[in-house]
Image: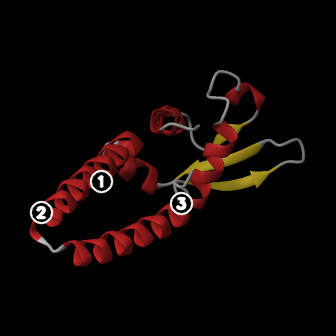
Amino acid sequence: MITPEEKDILLISLINSEQPVTIDRDFLKDKTTNAEIIINQFVSHGLVSVRQKFGNGMRIIQVEANAHDLLNRGGYKFKEEIFINNLTKLDLEIKKLEKDLPADKFDIITKAIGALASGVGIYTGLTT
């Protein structure tokens, strides 16, 4: 499993590197074993862009302003903490609703929330 901490470490490393960054075996050897996967996600999220690809897997990438913005806002770890806090808040609100609503209406709401959570999980890749 890739952790927010792994992403933040790699993001910091890329930002602190001389630009553009050459991604090759030397760059990756002391990074996380998931570096290639994480870099691909960085590309898809607009945090880095690929300037040049080579047949041996080497790439030259450029760190974009979005990467700096993300890091200035606490990085992936902070995003994860916000997500967990929002889920905790939702759980507390659902428990309050359970006390305030008739059982049949509460069941309808929890089913709708479950369907929504499942859809969000599929969209964000958070399903098991």
Residue placed at 42% from the left, 65% from the top? 117
Q: Which of 115 and 123 is in front in this view?
A: 115
Residue placed at 67% from the left, 29% from the top? 33
Q: Name the residue under label 2.
A: 99
Q: Residue furthest front?
A: 103
Q: Percent x, y for residue 13?
A: 52, 32
Q: Earlier in the sequence, mark 1 or mark 3?
A: 3
Left or right: residue 109 compared with residue 77? left
Q: Which amino acid does label 1 sit on?
A: Leu
Looking at the rendered image, the quarter that the N terminus falls into is top right
Q: Which of 18 and 102 is in front in this view?
A: 102
How packed mark 1 is, by other alpha carbons closer than 10 Å (few <14, some 14-19, many 20 or more), is: few
Q: Percent x, y for residue 59?
A: 75, 45
Q: Percent x, y for residue 97?
A: 15, 66
Q: Name the residue under label 3.
A: 46
User: How far apart are labels 1 and 3 at the CA level?
Assistant: 26 Å
Left or right: residue 24 compared with residue 71? right
Nearer the observer: mark 3 or 2; the answer is: 2
Q: Nearer the viewer, residue 70 or 20?
A: 70
Q: Which amino acid does label 3 sit on?
A: Gly
| Residue 100 vertical position relative to residue 76 in the rendered view, above or below | below
User: How far apart are labels 2 and 1 at the CA level?
Assistant: 19 Å
Nearer the observer: mark 1 or 3; the answer is: 1
